[in-house]
Image: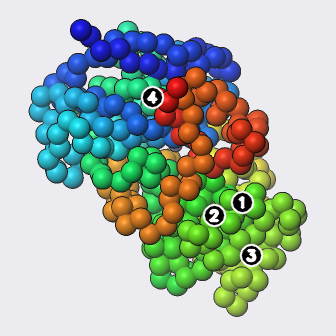
Amino acid sequence: MAKIGKVAVLDQVEGTFEVKEYEVPRAEPGTFLLKTELCGVCATDVHMYYGRFPDLQFPIILGHEHVGIIEELGSGRTVDYLGRPVKEGDRIIPAAGAGCGECYYCRIARTPTRCQNGATIGFTPDTADWRFAGGYGQYVYHKHSNMTFLKTDLPADVAVLLEPMCVGMNGVNRAGVRLGDTAVVQGAGAIGILAAVCAKRAGAANVIMVGAPKARLELAKKFGVDVVIDIDEHRSAEERIKLVKEETRLGIGADIVFECAGVPAAIPEGIAYLRDSARYVELGAFTDRGDVAINPHWDLLQKNVTLYAMWGDEITDYAQALPLLEKLEYPYAEIVSHKVPLTRVKDAVDAIGKGGYVLDGRGAIKIAVDPWMS
Ligand SMILES: [Zn+2]
Ligand SMILES: [Zn+2]
C-alpha cells in the first residue's frame, strides 16, 4: 500500500497553513527521499509568509533548514556530498538548494546559490509534479538531481543548526577573519550566535555581540562571545558605538563586523563600529526591509572600508561547518528553544513575525517543526 505523509501547505501570502496528506512518492533515479526529523523555522520563512519574496509561487510548503533519515535512495545515489557511502536509515543533512550545474553562476562564478535555474527546498511551489518540496512535512522529496546531503551522527536538534551556521561560515570564508581580530556581531539570533562561533573559531580574539534580549545574550556567552552589549539597555546608536569602540584595541574600532539582525538601521551603525580599513559583512538583510542612508564619503571612503554581502550559503560551507558542529564544543541544542507540530507552524511564524520572538510565554531563539509530533 502506498505510504501517506503529512505536510503543512501555505495557500497564499498571509494565508493559512493547512495540514494535508499526500501519497509519498518513490525516489526516482538520482533523487532521494528524506523522512524529516526537524525543520528549523527561519526568519526567511516568515518573510515569505508576509509576501516579501515577490516571485514566490503558492501554494507552497515552506522550510529549508531540515534534517532527517534517508527513507529511500533513488538508483545511482550511493554516497553523500563528501563521497562517503550512505544507506537508507542514515541521518543526513540535505543542502536546501541545488544549482543547475551549467550556467555562468554554477560553472564560472562558482556560486550556485545565485543560479536562476536550480531548485530550493522550501522555495518551490507545491504542485502535482513535485509534492513534498518543503521542510514542513513528514517527508521531503529531493527531486532535483543536483540536490545533495551530508551524513552525520549528530542529534537532530544540533544537526538542524547546520544551515544557519553556514550563513556565518560563508561570511567568515569570504570576508576572512584574521588571527587576533576583534569581531562584532550585530544580532543575537541563531545566525548571530552561530556566526560568532565561526568568527571565534577562525581566530578572532575578541567577539562582541550587540543585540537583545538579555536571555539570548546570556546564551551567546556560552558560545564564546566575550562581550555583550544589550540594545534594550543601551538604546541609542551613539552610545553603542562608543561602547563597542571601548572594547576594541586602542579604542579605534573593530576589525570586522557581521550584520546578522536584518535591520537596515544596523548597517550605518555597524560601519561606525569599524576602525579604518576594516571589513563590513552583510548577512542579515535577506528581504527588502527598506532603505537606509549612507554617506559615501564619511561612511565608506574616509573609512577605506571593504563591504561584503552574502546570499545565504553554499554547499561547500556545509562541508566546512559540519565538522565544527560535530565537535559539540558548545551547547548547541540550547539554541533550539521550541519544537512544534505541523499544526502549529502558524504559531511559530507569528511568534517571529509579530510576537517579539515569544512562544508559549517563553523567549524563542530557534523554533523547529517536528512533523511527527501531535
Ligand atoms: Zn534559514
Ligand atoms: Zn546554474
Indicate which label's residue lies in the foreground, 1 or 4: 4
Q: Do the residues bearing badges 1 and 2 touch, measured as CB atoms within 8 Å?
A: yes
Q: Residue furthest bottom?
A: 250
Q: Relative to 260, does residue 200 appear above or below in the rendering? A: below
Disc with the residue nearer the chain's start (1 vs 4): 1
Looking at the rendered structure, the kind of residue marked 1 is Ala
Number of the label disc, if any, that sits on residue 219: 2
> Residue at label 3?
244
Q: Do the residues bearing badges 1 and 3 touch, measured as CB atoms within 8 Å?
A: no
Indicate which label's residue lies in the foreground, 4 or 3: 4
Question: Residue 202, position in %: x, y?
Answer: 45, 73
Disc with the residue nearer the chain's start (4 vs 3): 3
The reply, left or right, for residue 270 in relation to residue 171 is: right
Which of 284 and 276 lies nearest the eye of the viewer? 284
Q: CA distance from mark 1 to mark 2?
A: 6 Å
Colouring of the image: rainbow
Disc with the residue nearer the chain's start (2 vs 4): 2
Looking at the rendered structure, the kind of residue marked 2 is Leu
Q: CA distance from mark 2 to mark 4?
A: 28 Å
Question: Residue 200, position in %: x, y?
Answer: 51, 73
Disc 2 residue lies near ligand 1 with CB under 8 A: no
Disc with the residue nearer the chain's start (3 vs 2): 2
Q: CA distance from mark 1 to mark 3?
A: 20 Å
Residues packed near mark 2 inside 10 Å, few (<14), some (14 to 19) or many (20 plus): some
Question: Residue 361, position in %: x, y?
Answer: 75, 42
Question: Residue 237, position in %: x, y?
Answer: 83, 64
Label 3: element kind:
helix
Q: Residue at x 76, y 83 (%)?
A: 246
> Residue at label 4?
372
Q: Quadrant of residue 329?
A: bottom left
Looking at the rendered structure, the kind of residue marked 3 is Val
